[in-house]
Image: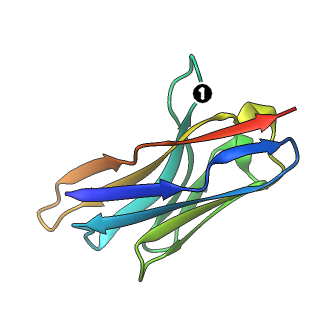
Amino acid sequence: QVQLVESGGGLVQAGGSLRLSCAASGSIFSRNTLGWYRQAPGKQRELVAAHTNGGYTNYADSVKGRFTISRDNAKNTVYLQMNSLKPEDTAVYYCNAHIINVLGYEYDYWGQGTQVTVSS
């Protein structure tokens, strides 16, 4: 089992910045990806950014150049620095851990979600 605890959401004006944090604990195997998804009202959950433990990162086109994902492997913590926020970034942001265990089985774990609201 993996537990994910998120923090850092809130209300910000357009053009502002927020930083999300997600601390993972439990069975974090060496092969894992930590990332952020978001879900706006009436929309499907979508990938925002992901960071493998090997250093590979991936971003949604809509956030490239504005958001930066980073992680501290020693702390099993992933961060999402969000700059130049837009009203369309308003959503509940979920931390995700994609784990591959020693037998090759893959699991997904989710945080409880944190609200990000960007006012115009």
Q: Quadrant of the N terminus?
A: bottom left
- Report helix, strand or loop for mark 1: loop
For the point 40% across and 73% down, which residue is it?
76
For the point 26% across and 58% down, which residue is it?
2
Query: Which x, y percent locates residue 22?
Result: 48, 61
Q: Residue furthest left?
A: 103
Which color scheme did the rendering employ for the protein? rainbow
Q: Residue furthest top?
A: 42
For the point 78% across and 54% down, which residue is it?
66
Q: Residues within 10 Å of mark 1 (few under 14, many from 20)?
A: some
- Residue type at tag 1: Ala
Q: Quadrant of the C terminus?
A: top right
Q: Is residue 21 left or right of residue 61?
A: left
Residue at mark 1: 40
Above or below for 87 versus 21: above
* The quarter of the displayed image where residue 61 is located: top right
Q: Is residue 112 left or right of residue 27?
A: right
Query: Which x, y percent locates residue 16?
Result: 84, 51
- Front-most of residues 115 and 83: 115
Query: Which x, y percent locates residue 72?
Result: 49, 77
Tally the numbered discs: 1
Q: Residue furthest bottom?
A: 74
Above or below for 26 versus 118: below
For the point 85% across and 42% down, which residue is it?
13
Above or below for 91 versus 4: above
